[in-house]
């Protein structure tokens, strides 16, 4: 019997069954991918055989989890991490043919319209999803009635004005992409593209943030001390799930036909 109690949580019974050494070997971000994926999927309906896009999958740990736990077909897409390495990890998990690694940019996805039943995005959506036009782009790959779900690090409330003193040591310019559940609800709902089903925060999410950091990066004192000092006032984990409405999406302009006609450069003097 495995006596290693790292990464075991009553809140995440599915994730707790996985070997911590395997999980740690697949670290690709500042959140436990299995905890976040399990939390997210409690708010999504995933059935065997569904086609699921795991967008920003990192080292495909979340993709493997989705396949094993729900029997869905998963396209594991990431820009920063090797599809070849992910293929090896998928094969070692015995899931070749059920999880398909793809190297691609979230803004240039190689899929047909309405291809997926669902999109899952774990701890990376803020890097590209704050763009006012991005939801229209991403929703085009999801069937009407399909779901898009995101979860990961975020804010419990928006920062009004300057960064609070206790966050300043850790806060960098790229962290302005983090937002609260109410902001994300507003960001999606106003488009009319999605019916929002869930927009919330994980209870005591900051504690899980700390637990994960202390395992994977105990030397990261700035972040650990910041999360400790904040105690969930601003920092935690957020979740957003929406279902695509059957509305017409704006067409994506990928190229403009060109036709050059030569004209005089200057006016001709009479």
Image (tube, rainbow, N blue to C red):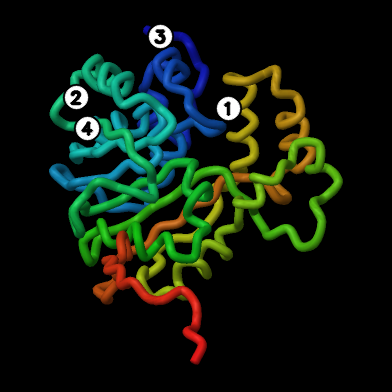
Q: Is residue 264 above or below residue 270?
A: above
Q: Nearer the viewer, residue 214 or 187?
A: 187
Q: Residue at x 78, y 43 (%)?
A: 167
Seen in the image, is 144 located left or right of residue 61? left
Name the residue carrying label 3: 2
Q: Do callouts 1 and 2 mark residues in contact (Cβ within 8 Å)? A: no
* Neighbours of disc 3 within 10 Å: few (<14), some (14-19), many (20+): few
Q: Earlier in the sequence, mark 3 or mark 2?
A: 3
Give the alpha-carbon distance from disc 4 to disc 1, as whole Å. 27 Å
Q: Earlier in the sequence, mark 4 or mark 2?
A: 2
Where residue 8 sits: x, y (%)?
48, 24
Name the residue carrying label 1: 212
Q: Do callouts 3 and 1 mark residues in contact (Cβ within 8 Å)? A: no
Q: Earlier in the sequence, mark 4 or mark 1?
A: 4
Name the residue carrying label 2: 95
Where residue 70 sits: x, y (%)?
23, 39
Q: Earlier in the sequence, mark 3 or mark 1?
A: 3
**Farthest-out residue, bottom:** 270
* Neighbours of disc 4 within 10 Å: few (<14), some (14-19), many (20+): many
Give the alpha-carbon distance from disc 3 to disc 2, as whole Å. 24 Å
Name the residue carrying label 4: 100
Q: Earlier in the sequence, mark 1 or mark 2?
A: 2
Q: Residue at x 44, y 65 (%)?
A: 133
């Amino acid at each position: 019997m495995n006596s290693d109690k790292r990464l075991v949580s009553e809140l995440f019974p599915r994730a707790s069954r996985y070997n911590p050494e395997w999980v740690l070997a697949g670290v690709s971000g500042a959140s436990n991918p299995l905890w976040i994926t399990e939390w997210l999927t409690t708010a999504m309906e995933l059935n065997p055989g569904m086609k699921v896009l795991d967008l920003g999958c990192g080292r495909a740990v979340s993709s493997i989890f989705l396949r094993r736990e729900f029997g869905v077909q998963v396209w594991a897409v990431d820009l920063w991490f090797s599809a070849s390495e992910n293929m090896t990890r998928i094969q070692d998990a015995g899931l070749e043919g059920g999880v398909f690694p793809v190297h691609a940019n979230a803004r240039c996805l190689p899929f047909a319209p309405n291809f997926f039943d669902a999109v899952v995005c774990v701890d990376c959506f803020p890097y590209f999803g704050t763009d006012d036009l991005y939801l229209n782009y991403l929703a085009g790959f999801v069937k009407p009635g399909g779901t898009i779900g995101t979860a990961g690090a975020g804010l419990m409330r928006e920062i009004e004005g300057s960064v609070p003193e206790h966050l300043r040591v850790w806060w960098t310019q790229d962290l302005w992409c983090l937002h609260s559940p109410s902001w994300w609800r507003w960001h999606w709902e106003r488009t009319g593209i999605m019916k929002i089903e869930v927009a919330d925060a994980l209870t005591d999410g900051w504690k899980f943030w700390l637990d994960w950091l202390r395992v994977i990066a105990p030397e990261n004192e700035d972040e650990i001390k910041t999360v400790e000092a904040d105690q969930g006032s601003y920092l935690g984990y957020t979740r957003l799930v929406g279902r695509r409405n059957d509305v017409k999406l704006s067409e994506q302009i990928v190229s403009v036909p060109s036709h050059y006609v030569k004209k005089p450069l200057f006016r001709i003097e009479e």
